[in-house]
Amino acid sequence: MKQETLSALEEHYALLAAAAVDQFFPPRNINDTLSVLAALNYLNTVVKKPGGRRVTSYYYIKGMAACLFLHLLYRPIQGVAIYWSESDGVTYFRVKNWQFSFHYVPYLVYYANVIDEKELTPQQWDGIRLQEMAMTILRLCCPTDLKADESAMTRMMLFNKKDMVSRLNISLPQEDSNLINNAKTKEKAKISSRCRYVREARNRRMREARCRRGDRQDSLKALALALTFRIESTHCFELYRRKDDRRLKVMRYTGRNYNELQQYLTNHVSKVMYRGQETLKPGYFYFVHRRYRCLWFMKPSKYIYYIAQNNYLKCEGHYYNLCLTYDIVRWLAQLYPMLRFINIMNFNRMTNQRRYYTYNALLRVPLRSKARRLKVWLIVDKEGLLSDRLVRFMPANIINDYCTTSDSYVNYEVTHQDGKEGIYAYKHIHLLKPIYKKVIIKNYFAQVMDSNNRWAIYALLKERFETEFIYDHIWYDDNKRAILGKIHNNVIAIKTFKAEQALD
């Protein structure tokens, strides 16, 4: 039977841990620091257990971790190393060969520029799960005879919601104070403007969840749309990239719908730069370029490319997958020799010549290929030969197979083996063997760390390294529209994106 509450011993040590934090913070030496970390590590274990949140809270644990980090940032203690990985959202403390880590510690984003100026030594997780031995570490590092007032400790951990960092008695340099105040102002503005997008994202996920339920009626609707959707005959539409929850709204400019086009694509978002009407070409499709925040035209030669990368179509508030199964496209190819098909598992690879399949080419797909078992096929019907009425003539077995086949939308995955990481692509290719210390996939680029803690950029579409392993830190700067890297104190632009790279 599942445990409903903490044991009496666990609750006793939780109060003891709170008393240790209360007594030893702010730390005066390495032993005080270790005591605070051991206590927070134990509380971080307790809060995850059934009944743990009636004793302590994430707000208290992560808030005190932030206080400890900032105290050590301005008042370093010999033998204690700290590091904050903004990209991973992890805060590290290393004391006496023990590494304590805490995810999503608050407040530190306000101090990002200050932390960067301190040039802390980067840390990576060493793979040791200290929470599994949290009680043992607490007993080793904290006195067991501390007096813990139960009501006072509980009140401190559960009900004190004030900004903990404001209690720190740290005299900040004026330039640091300005940086932090500016960061707080920007972050609050960002949070306020983000509320509407959070609601929209939640609604999109709910609609997508309804679309993924496997309901046969929804599957048949998706099948009908996949058969009939053609960009050439559509006025406006919205595509969706499920792997990273990204939408692409597109509309044709007719020469007389300038205001309608702007309203549909931008929804009056102030950050979008409006192009002059004289710069638009009638007959072309336009969308909002996500990096440049302006209207950008879609080349007819790339219509299939855009659908291959954003293969869900919005219809009546739902998102439907436009990809089909192998049996359906083979059946269609036999009936309509003029049709062509693409396989998104290889079409998006820049290392390959983009291939269009005919009926004979489909027959040559290997029997054990995953392309025969997944929804990865798109129709290229330039002549408009197909209609949704075809569904009623399809063999029942291939429709049943289509309705029960799950969507395939994750092209790149991080693989793990013996503590090392690599990249597995398209369900059948190892782009990078699991021999690297860390791999972070972001969009169509991966950050890869070698055994010397140096970073490099790997281009997933080109399937090659863009740089050597020479960077201490890598990040994307939205304002500069570039991937930046840091070597010692020098910041270098690794890759600056051009306007035509709309979906990189």
Image: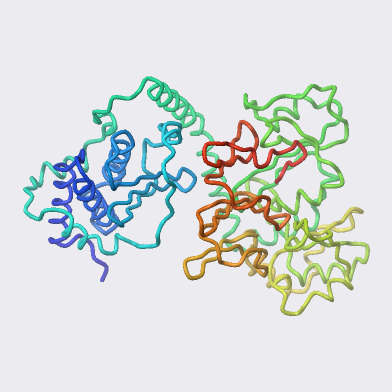
Give 195 or 142, whichever is nearer the viewer: 142
Residue 349 position (above or below residue 279): below
**Horizontal and vertical percent for residue 402?**
69, 68
The reply, left or right, for residue 155 in relation to residue 373 is: left
Give 119 or 213, whichever is nearer the viewer: 119
**Horizontal and vertical percent for residue 362?**
83, 72
Residue 450 position (above or below residue 266): below
Give 38 or 449, whichever is nearer the viewer: 449
Quadrant (top left, top right, bottom left, bottom right) of the N terminus: bottom left
Q: Quadrant of residue 372?
A: bottom right
The reply, left or right, for residue 5 in relation to residue 132 is: left
Q: Quadrant of residue 256?
A: top right
Tally of marks: 0
Residue at (86, 65) in percent of width and height: 357
**Horizontal and vertical percent for residue 160?**
22, 36
Residue 256 position (above or below residue 22): above
Give 467 or 356, whichever is nearer the viewer: 467
**Horizontal and vertical percent for residue 184?**
42, 27
Q: Residue furthest bottom?
A: 367
